[in-house]
Image: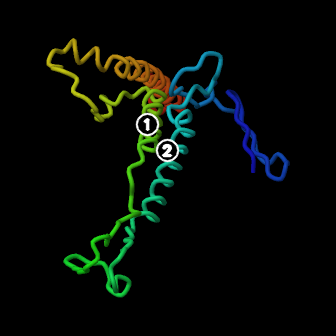
Amino acid sequence: MTEITSATAWQRYEDKELVAEGELPWGFLPVVHIQNIAQPYYYEGLSDVEPLIPLQDELNTRLSDRANRITFQTFKMYLGKGIEGFEDKPISPGRMWYTDNPDAAIEEFGGDAATPSEDMHIAEIREAMDKASGVTPVVAGVLKNKLGNLTSAVALRLTFMGMLSKTGRKKFTYNEGLKKIAQMVLDILDKANIYKI
């Protein structure tokens, strides 16, 4: 089934055959489009989320890599040198070995070692997400360093200026869309003789 609606009429097709049609008394399409973020010369506008998807995919990949590395490398292993019967006794807290060999040693290896390059890469991806989203870490509540004494309203306003202006633009766009919706509802009620304007 396919329905075609215009400002003055509607038609319904089933299997490519016209089965019903009629006039619309409203004189307009009852549709309001609110752009999330205005984009010049484009009807649909921009999304807040779309530019973040590749960054989120990269972050998910890196965090999955880290989880796999931790899973496979967290088990510590021990190499005993110069200790008789070392292989027969399991390593456990409080386990004691004795030997007369002055060169004997137990070396620990494996486990989750620090990976500064991985940590730095994840931090860079998160920073890129902050920049692409326009939400600063301060606004998101992720404070890395002290910002000083932000007691005055002016200091807070300067800190949150980008987010406040973005929110103001969205508020204006959504207000305009809601006004159009309300006007359309009132016009439809008026033409249906339910409520007179």
Picture quadrant of residue 25: top right
Left or right side of 108 for 179: right
Q: Amino acid at mark 2?
A: Leu
- Residue 93, image x, y percentages: 22, 76
Residue 146 appears left or right of 54: left
Residue 196 visible in the picture:
no
Tag 2's secondary structure? helix
Would residue 98 be found to the left or right of residue 71 on screen? left
Identify the residue at image location x=37%, y=74%. Answer: 81
In percent of width and height, residue 74 lies at 39, 64
The residue indicated by pointer 1 is 126
Residue 105 or residue 41, whichever sits in front = 105
Name the residue tied to disc 2: 59
Amino acid carrying mark 1 in the image: Arg
Q: Is residue 54 placed above or below 86 in the rendered structure?
A: above
Count of residue discs: 2
Q: Disc 1 vs disc 2: Cβ atoms closer than 8 Å? A: yes
